[in-house]
Amino acid sequence: MTPEELIQIAEERRGQQAAVGKRINVCAAASCMSRHSDKIAEEMSSHAESLGDKAEGVEVRCVGCMGLCSAGPLVEVDHPADEAAGNDAPKTMYRGVSMDDADRIVEAAAGGTTVEQLVQPTDIPYFSRQKRIVTENSGYIDPESIEDYIAADGYSGLVTALTEMSPNDVLHEVTISGLRGRGGGGFPTGLKWSTVAKTDADKKYVVCNADEGDPGAFMDRAVLESDPHRIIEGMTIAGYAVGASKAYIYVRAEYPLAIARLKKAIRQAQKYELLGTNLCDTPFNFEIELRLGAGAFVCGEETALIASIEGRRGVPRPRPPFPASYGLYGKPTLINNVETLATIPWIVRNGGDALASIGTAKSKGTKVFALAGKIVNNGLIEVPMGISLREIVYDIGDGIPDGGTFKAVQTGGPSGGCVPGNLLDMPVDYESLQEAGTIMGSGGMIIMDEASNMVDVARFFMEFCKDESCGKCTPCRVGTAQMLDLLEKLCAKSATEKDLELLKELCDVVKACSLCGLGQTAPNPVLSTLRYFEDEYMGSLVGGVSGDGRPVPDVETKAGAPDRIER
Amino acid sequence: MIATITKPEAPSDDKRWKIVQATMRRNGYSRNALIETLHTVQNSFGYLDEPALRYVAASLRVPLSNVYGVATFYHLFTLKPQGEHTCVLCTGTACYIKGTPELLQHVEERYGIRDGETTEDGKVSLLTARCIGACSMAPAVVFDGEMEGEVTQEQLDEQVEAWMAS
């Protein structure tokens, strides 16, 4: 592939697109697909065909995630021909489209009208307050078409990097962009890349961590399903910058659609010689292989992930040596999260400065969050760093449904914590969240209302950590089980003050002594709920009442989540 | 001295072993391919039984204890056969907040099966997953690989009863 060929493919595809009068885009990401959006798209296609001349110029295609998952299945009608000609061409989005609506949407699109009852307004803050970099193509391109991706400037970053930049130039752009690891740790990406680049070795690896295990997080899944080529491009640029020629994508087996699309994308990229040997007529070779996880949360930890790729139990090992010097098969390995790698093509295309101009002093760029729980607009959002939690919850998320009152937002999954209402004006960046006792995490945000019992929330996460602890180090294996016992006692209102003291002490011990991130962060949900909702803990003691006399919400069920599956 | 390594024989002449062999061959019978191979066995046979584990261990020249270790470490691998149909309840945070515990309790009470168990007639297995990434549609349930969002008790009963009657 030469730069000229790439431009030619892009122009050819843009030309094809500009010839389409009316285009019906149907969301085909997992969330809408589970509501049978693929069948709806089929029905629309066949109906358009049966209309014959009446539906001339109407094209039906599947696109990636449009973000507003709770209103799915989503369908958007646009007019590429008018847009290309510079004419006014308003787009229409439809929400909650069912099989029965398919035919009339096709007819309305063909006739230039709209189906008013189904229109989803797009001038609401949910859409206008977002800043889309990682998800710039989600909902706009067909994830299974490499030509669509190329037409949207895809692979131009890779080709530019290979033909016009040295690996050091790429490292420089990534470093000045200020990008930090989006998997949760927030380690500066440029520094990580430089470390791997500087290490001398005959073979190096790039690994994409797509083992999105945090309950309540589905950002990576949406990116993989909506724009798989973006990951391939990001990884290949990373390989060029650090001097690696082989890469693995470690993806959860729970994401079958993402796996299928990645496989297809890799085949397409190989066919276009964007993966393989002597890319862009340079000596640079690069290949990508998929590795499926098998359902172990701890495999998101980098050393455990390496063990799993090597076919062993996903058990972490002490660091140093860090994977940057001693990783996969003992070779220097660059491990980045999906979202981090998905930002890379944009950085190469627009320059590191462009990303650095977005966000706060220490947290640059944008972050994708998955909004879920008790919130009106469930779904995926991408916002600039530094935006306040209040804007996310009340403007973009449109507040709490059914007249409920906001109680807390949980970020960072089982490694994070809860942020209460009085801190809602806090900016969302790595440092502020850490100060508030939680973490950025991979981007899951669960919104809770008054009905949630915070002790039960802490118990839920502790149960998760206990189940997922790999069992290698004692503080985590035994500590999480002991903390869970105490939390269960609290939930059953049979705990004493002494139990609460013991729980606090255990939190410190497990945090300080565990081997890997899982154990070190396991006490976080307890610590943060203790910090902001101590009255609920006091109220959960034998005969206790909460500090301000409010009744503590009852733990709703006794069943809870089940014990570990007996095999 | 010439040491010859003979490939172990497949546990049976079931054709599905060819698929398993293909996976191992594609990975050069490397021990790194252990998880990949177990995935293939489970996809082909539905679960991992002892002869399968022994065969994979011998083929990849990995100690049986390691194979057993890997098979029991990862939640996705199961050593017991599943029922004809599977019903996977998501117990992620969003689903937990929006009602999975009630659904679980309901299934346990009504059909007498707990997580990981199969109904007596072997028709339906109940499983749970730690977040399947369908948080915006909580509570989510996967019926035989098909994901359903915002599942109510009635919907769950309808599906399970249809299976049990079949």
Image (tube, helix red, strand yellow):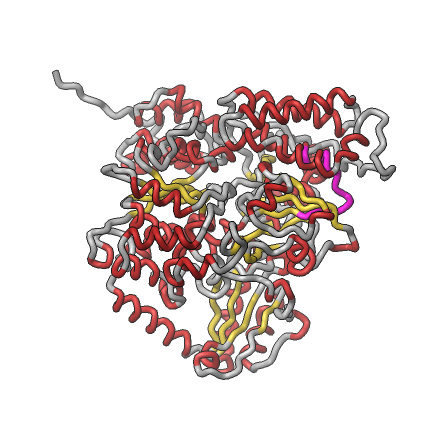
Is B72 included in the stretch rendered in magenta?
A: no
In percent of width and height, residue A293 lies at: 44, 38
Q: Residue at x 37, y 76 (%)?
A: A15
Residue A387 in the image: state x and y as whole percent: 60, 56
Which residue corresponds to the image point at 35% horizontal and 27% vertical from the top-left?
B56
Q: Nearer the viewer, residue A287 or A168?
A: A168
Q: Position of residue A259 (x, y in %)?
A: 43, 48
Furthest-left residue in this view: B1
Q: Is residue A446 visible?
A: yes
Q: Is residue A545 left or right of residue A70?
A: right
Q: Nearer the viewer, residue B162 or A37?
A: A37
Q: What stretch of residues is rendered in magenta? A: A447-458
Instruction: Please state which of residues A207 and A47 is positioned toward the viewer in this rendering.
Output: A207
Residue A50 as seen in the image, left or right of residue B11: right
User: Relative to residue B123, is residue A395 depicted above or below?
Assistant: below
Q: Residue furthest right?
A: A549
Location of the N terminus of chain A by quadrant is bottom left
Q: Residue at x 55, y 41 (%)?
A: A214
